[in-house]
Amino acid sequence: MAEGRVVGIDLGTTNSLVAYMEGDKPVVIPGVDGSNLVPSVVALDPMPAGGGRPTVTVGNSARKALIERPERVIYSVKRLMGRGLSEVESESKWFPFRLADDVEAGEVPRIQLGELRFTPPEISAYILRQLKRNAERFFGVPVTQAVITVPAYFNDAQRQATKDAGRMAGLEVLRLVNEPTAAALAYGLDRAKQGTIAVYDLGGGTFDISILKLRDGIFEVQSTNGDTHLGGDDVDNLLLAVALDEIHSEHGVDLRAHAGAVQALRKAAIDAKVQLSTQTVAQFDIELPNGDRYQREIPREVFENLIEPVLDRTVGPCKQAMLDAGVIPEQIDEVVLVGGSTRIPAVRQLVDDVFHLSARGKRPQVELNPDEVVALGAAVQADILAGTSKTTEEMLLLDVTPLSLGIEQLGGTVARIIERNSTIPASATEHFTTGVDGQTNVAIHVVQGERELAADCRSLARFDLKGIPPMSAGLPRIEVRFLIDADGILQVSAREQRSGTSAHIEVKPTYGLTDDQVESMILDSFDHAEEDFMKRLLIEARNEADTILAAVERGPENPAWSHLSENERAAIGGARDHLAQVKTGDDLQFIREATVALDQATRHFAELLMEAAVSSAIRGKTMETAGEELGDEVSAPHPMAPAEFK
Amino acid sequence: MLKVLDSAVPVACWSCSIAHNDSTLFCPHCSKIQPPPGADFFTVFGLNPHLNLDPASLEKEFYRLSRRVHPDRFARAAQNEKEWSLADTALLNDAYRTLNDPITRTEYLLKLHGAEIGEEHSGKDRRTGKMGASRFPADLLEEVFELNMQLEEMRMEHKRGEEDPALKQSLSEARKKFEGLRDAVDQDLYGQWNAWDSGDEAARHAAQKTMVALLDRRRYLSNLVRDVTEALEGKEGATIFTQRGR
């Protein structure tokens, strides 16, 4: 293959996944621990004794550090992507984020982790790099191109920040795809679907609603709406607040100051929430630092009343999206549910009400795992972009821009130049002139949003058109072309028409990193070069060999060993010696083959061990511990450590 | 800006060097993608410049062209083809959006034929703040005056946190009435299409004049409806005499 694979990545608030097309079917690539979900948690290991930079860990292992050293761990960083300092400060009420305090107003906020500081895209880059490595380990070749999903309602700055993160992680981001649209792709793949569908996507931190028209493989988004700060996190926060208040009033303990304790309580809140999706009552039972126990029952009804205001915030966007698409609920053929929060029965009821589903004998679509469907759709889009597959060659996604693009006029009002829900790429050409004789530059303020006044919209960028030839006021005619590309990101170009000179534009995004800054943040330990990559694979192969060798070494200690025949033991010994020998060499292929050979030689032994494990489980011993370990490692519902107080 | 229909200048294909008439997204000879054509939106879709058109076949052609020109088809192409794909698709999307809506289609075609239609903002020199001349529909003078009083009252009440159901009712009725007037304008407009599409020179000229006046009236009515809606929803800053959008 001339070019490598393109993978699809769901960079989520809570969990992240990487997927690819295996033939005509998208599949999620598991991590080393066998889990499909990589918790979007990044932790900084303790400073090495000899100095130098501490190691950064991602995922389940980072999650474990959350209670031990919360000051060195960050999660839900997606909430901070592409946002300004003042916006981020309001978030920090609920999260143990420590922001570096010497950052200036216009700069990208920095998160303090131990002795180091990171921008939100850098943190996301660590998560992306982990996914990239998982994919590389899986394929055995470097992976350099990806499709990454973003909430449909993400603005320009949030999209740019996501793209920056990809670059820092050594990935060429071929496309940013909107999450609900990706989900529609995953659903629309195996059935030749026609008609109008709505995708209701309530994730950990964001809410999106998109309405699409499906026809002959074309997925045409009609409208989209949402809230980039609404999701399961808000539900958790409500439960957490109740618990913190009750603990304070009933036990006289204010836990808010103890970051580790708050995290433990948060984990308990999440467990309760998850339980309430299948049971009618859940329990809080937590030992407090002073030895007291906080015990409480939460009936589902109480929970539903508590979260009703949060869920109700999704209704307005749904109605607006239908209005913008020009459809009524009866015209929507299917509603697809995406995101872990759609497991909450009250959410399903709300969707049913808003789209009149049961009245029409319909049910929401939930066949695909709501945690994985976005990544699966990203893999489909990756396949479309790679352009090498029959399965997707007839498929095409036509997406829209979620927010109107406008320019600030005299008096602070906004002139809209590209309306929301316009199919992208979309462009607009505007003409500007000077107001004073001899004026050589014109300032333009670009905003995104639906409000009348620029001050109420989201400031995107200020452009300075420079180098206009001096002329009388009103004479220059500068043509500025605004283009929203297929990623939903704005590009600007300008030309002075009378003199024919092209005006120089200096784009200063209101929030964002410059090209040089991104360049300097590209993760150091990068495995761009083939040689580095091979070196890493070699190290990993040796580690794998060491693991199996160590297990074989301990074999004779196990009673099952005595059940092996003489021949089997001899075969194991031969394969072991062979692996031990080739392991010291540099040939990756030899090491892998020898590892496989030893693995095969020990297969019968492994089966014997498995039988022993099952029979002891029946006796009710190991299963319990095994179950606990599984619960901790596999498909974790939320990146939190178990609720235990030390 | 927009070129007159038949003035497309021949250009040479960047790839095979054979000249084509600059109205196509793809070279008719070697099929390679071309830079954005200078032709008008109708030509891009291979349509006659008519006001009557079949939405289903427009959509079909939009999908067919999108499949070929979209940036998703050029994700791994050379830089120049990538850029043209982006610019061409933006043009295609703008063209589809414009032609698919009967009102914007009418405005667009009349403008191609030199009609001056009170514009929203494109082509306007922003710094000088020149607005298209507002042609006030004289027959609506009294009602608009009355409406403005009510809107002002509504805003004051909203500021004081009060609500007068009778006023709300009256405004809702006014909105319904203006919506009805706007729909009537649309019917009048469509009534002129045949004359424009297939009439002789004089009939065309008359139809164009009528439609320009109707579009002006329509824009005014749309603004009224929008402002009443905003006042009813309690939004700030609705001002009735500013000319925005259609």
Image (spheres, rainbow, N blue to C red):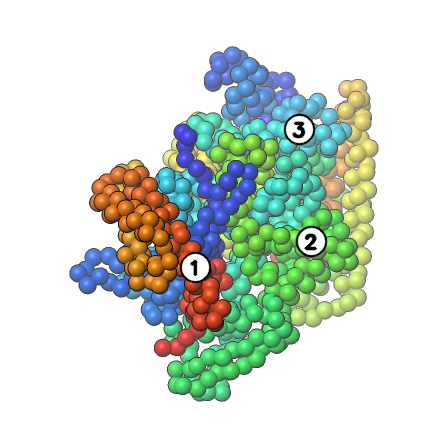
Q: Position of residue A374 (x, y in %)?
A: 54, 49
Q: The disc numbered 1 marks a residue on which chain?
A: A
Question: Looking at this view, is A593 or A394 the one in front?
Answer: A593
Amino acid type at circle 3 is: Glu
Q: Chain of mark 2?
A: B
Q: Are marks 3 and 2 in contact (CB under 8 Å)?
A: no
The residue under the point 43% across, 81% down is A287
Residue type of the residue flagged with mark 2:
Asp
For label 3, the residue is B61
Front in this rendered view, residue A542 or A427: A542
Labelled disc at residue B227: 2
Residues behind callouts 1 and 3 on a single chain: no
Tell me the distance, in whole angstroms, between the alpha carbons under discs 3 and 2: 37 Å
Quick check: B13 above or below A240?
Answer: above
Q: Identity of the amino acid at label 1? A: Met
Could you tell me if residue A230 is visible in this image? no
Disc 1: CA contacts within 10 A as few (<14), some (14-19) or many (>=20): few
Residue marked by disc 1: A610
> Residue at position x 69%, y 45% from top?
A196
Q: Give the residue at x 47% y 18%.
A: B14
Q: Which mark is first along the chain, 2 or 3?
A: 3
